[in-house]
Amino acid sequence: MKIKMSANEKSLVNKCINKYCKKVNDFRSAIKQLANSYQVREYYDMLERYSMFVQNTIQEVAEIIFPKESGVQIYLSGSFARGIGRTYSDLDVSCFYKYFRKYYRYEEIFCYTLCKIFGFIRFKVHNIMLFSAPIRNFIKSPKIEYFVDGHKIEECIHIELDLNYNCSKYLKDFKKYIYEHNLDYIKEWMMSIIPVIDDGNILERWQKDILNYNKMNIHCLNALKESIRGKIKSYMLITFEKFTSSQKLKKSLKKYPLDIIYSFFIYYMLTSNIPMQNNLRALIKTLFQSDDEFIKKVMHLFSLTYMDLDNLDIFLRENNINFSTHSTELLNLPEINKHYFAMHGVEQITTKILNNYKQLFTYFINYIGD
């Protein structure tokens, strides 16, 4: 499959790239500086501003690329949806529309444009919901060697593109999945979605409905508590060896602990007197503004650890060291820690982040009980 753009489409894409590229770089420079100097409040404020910029950019690019008659609905997930997108966070963007074969090419041109604006390979702009949305009659998509005017596609994304090519693009199918998988207890990913283009505030209604159900049913609260407790128990056993895979490092310092943290934030909201929020962006902002001493202690340690994670991510990226859940490449952690110390003056950064998470999780256990 090779998607060719018309002259007019190329012109529109180039206008988007020229409009937003410098702004992205300016935000990243500011975030790097604040993370490196550990200015907690200023760092969080900048992440919030950057996340809103990303959301607005996605909306404007979509409105330019997709024909109006497509009726596309677009949702943002992940760290940018939570309002705390790091310097090089992925873009988790999901598109829904009725006529897949008619509008799929526009989705790829849309993703191509975002790749160019944010300086990402195609793999970093992905439909995170496709791993959850129902699959209809799976058919392997045509072998994709290139897409959108010679922009080369990396091999690791072929499986994801096959899923995107076959998963349902109907919101009603995703709604069914959401309700089926959040009525035992609410999942943090459900709270990590915000609308970009959402006619009728559909997502907000679903989130309110599911949150109210979970708050009113004790079995949901108990199930969420047990899930958090079990994940913390497993996380406390994690250690690093001299040679640790990129996959294990990324999952141990980002995927696993952040899932626990955001799940706890939701549990705290459902069991305390703070105002109910429909998504984690609003909830995290509420928690940062809290006067409660326990929450202030939690958010301070969370912020410092999040800045360390951002600094490490930047360091690895700028030194061409693979930091991916999809890579089994072995990393020499003593060498990474040594070179990181030489640049930032922080000793044993990988162990420091790991131990900070474990300290944070002891706070959580004290709150929910053993």
Image: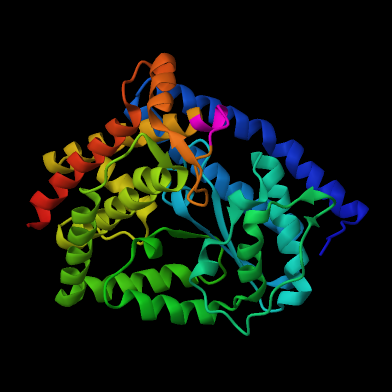
Q: Residue at x 21, y 73 (%)?
A: 220
Q: Assign the N terminus to one quadrant of the image.
A: bottom right
Whole-percent x, y for residue 295 in the image: 18, 43
Location of residue 336 by image quarter: top left
| In this view, 336 is above or below 124 | above
- The image quadrant where one finds the C terminus is bottom left
Q: Position of residue 117 (x, y in %)?
A: 68, 41
- 272 inside magenta stretch: no
Q: Is residue 189 left or right of residue 364?
A: right
Q: Is residue 182 left or right of residue 152?
A: left
Res 178 quadrant in image = bottom left
Q: Is residue 142 visible?
A: yes
Q: Quadrant of residue 245?
A: top left
The segment highlighted magenta reads 316-321
Residue pushed farthest right? 7
Q: Is residue 186 found left or right of 269 in the rendered image?
A: right
Rendered residue at 44%/20% (across/down):
339
